[in-house]
Image: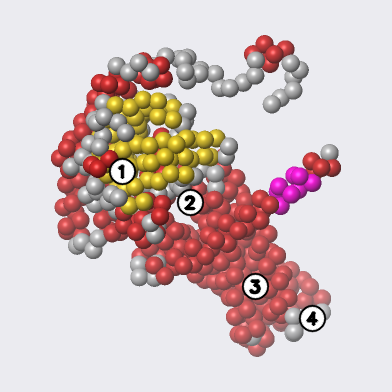
Amino acid sequence: MDKSVSPQNSLVSVKHLTFTRGDTKIFDDISMEFERGKITAIMGPSGTGKTTLLKLIGGQLFPNQGIINIDNKNVHQLRRADLYSLRKRMGMLFQSGALLTDMNVYDNVAFPLREHTHLPESMIRTLVLMKLQAVGLRGARNLMPNELSGGMARRVALARAIALDPMMIMYDEPFTGQDPISKGALVHLIKSLNNTLGLTSIMVSHDVQETTAIADYIYVISGGKIVGQGTPQEIKQSTSEWVQQFMTGTADGPVHFHYPAKDYVDDLLSSGKRY
Amino acid sequence: MMIKFLQLLGKSTRASFTKLGRASFFLIQIVSGIASVLPRPRLLLKQMYSVGVLSFLIITISGLFVGMVLGLQGYYTLSDFGAEETLGVMVAASLVRELGPVVSALLFAGRAGSALTAEIGLMKATEQLSGMEMMAVDPIKRIISPRFLAGLLSMPLLAALFSAVGIIGGQLVGSGLLGVDEGAYWSQMQANIDFQDDIINGVLKSLVFGFVTSWIALFEGYDSIPTSEGVSRATTRTVVNSAFSILGLDFILTALMFGDD
């Protein structure tokens, strides 16, 4: 279907996916491939359903049409137990971190290990400290989630996501609301984890600079369709108006600045009836 | 106008029934999740601490005052008929049969139920539940079922505490202040309160109230709209719906249990 992604080597493949919420079509017949061992980014304006896509891949939402295969298994046809055992091999980094607020950093990272393995506490300790060391927060193990900054919370969540040594990680807007130093730290972490652990990464983001720096392949979605795809270089040179508007951050273009409304003058002159 | 009204009526009726359906389905999930709580008593103990032990103070103090008021009011009425010796029976029967289960359940809904709803609602809003699902941990089994079981088990204990403290409160006022004979207070109570009819029925009532209150509180939290307004509304609904259910069910249970007396 495209030049650089061969479906044979993809870990996750999305085929003819359609998803609607109410009357709105969030996705309209989109297909994507996520190659093993690579970082694939999904970019697009806010509200295009990027997070929804991750939830569809994770099996938390059901598509109206189309299929999503992970490791050659159709996620939405798995039995519950099989879905759960598949999820043990998937990590997900939520935008908020989604740390459990009644546990400290150490217990949060230990949580999946304690839930899913019968390892002795001494081994759990070793594993937790290794994961925390990888994200540079071994010294913060006794802090509670409310004592962490946004960037630290995301790094703890990342340590938790890799606790069970998953085959893939999904990142939901990892850079949003981060200061430049935290952003840099996260960019570095995502790249180095992907390479050292041989992970497959799916990253949803609208931060152009950070994403193009580390992604191997990028899909740009807007209005439920894929409007552009390719390597970061190809995306930058894309002639598509949509892609250009997004990459350069122009206020108006194919994606309109205004939310759909009736004619401005008519609206001002009409009676005071509220809509 | 009429059509619009009918449409609205139909819409809200349908919404209520859908919600009831979701709640019933949720209950089935909770109950089937209980099996996985039993091998992990620590999860249960932690929740029993936060819904049960932390409600200890409010239950004790309220029980004491309700008992004292009963002692006072009972004395005034009974002494008109020269029957103040039966004060113990009156205080104990009202507490064990009615006030103990009902008032402690209302307090429980206000103190622990609202806290449960807010906690679950906020866990939903901060994606903690969703995050757990993605870590292949079922939030129903890990979070909801232990809380449900804790509520169910704590309620009869709290009601018993309420009644016991209330009886002591009645005695303090009755024989301490108003001069009812202490021996008569206790012996009349012992002779006239039946274990099966009064105490077991009271315990059954509080089990039912614990079940319903925990179910409502957890469902409202789980079903809440994950925003600050949504969680605040859900918390209000927990307290209001629990109060209605407790009082309504109390009438039905009383009619069933004490009807033949």
Q: Are the two marked residues, 2 and 4, in contact with CB atoms closer than 8 angstroms? A: no
Please give left or right for residue B109 compared with residue A186 in the image. right
Q: Which residue is mark 1?
A: A12
Q: Which residue is mark 3?
A: B95
Q: Which residue is mark 2?
A: B120
Bounds of the magenta segment? B6-13
Check disc 4 and give the amino acid type.
Gly
> In the displayed image of the protein, which residue is found farthest to the bottom?
B191
Q: Chain of mark 3?
A: B
Query: What residue do we see at 73% from left, 72% from top?
Result: B74
Q: Which residue is mark 4?
A: B82
Percent coordinates x, y for residue B139 in the rendering: 42, 56
| Quarter of the figure with the N terminus of chain A | top left
- Whether marks 2 and 4 lie on the same chain: yes
Residue B98 colored magenta?
A: no
Query: What residue do we see at 79% from left, 46% from top?
Result: B6
Query: What residue do we see at 33% from left, 42% from top?
Result: A13
Q: Chain of mark 1?
A: A
Tag 2, which secondary structure? helix
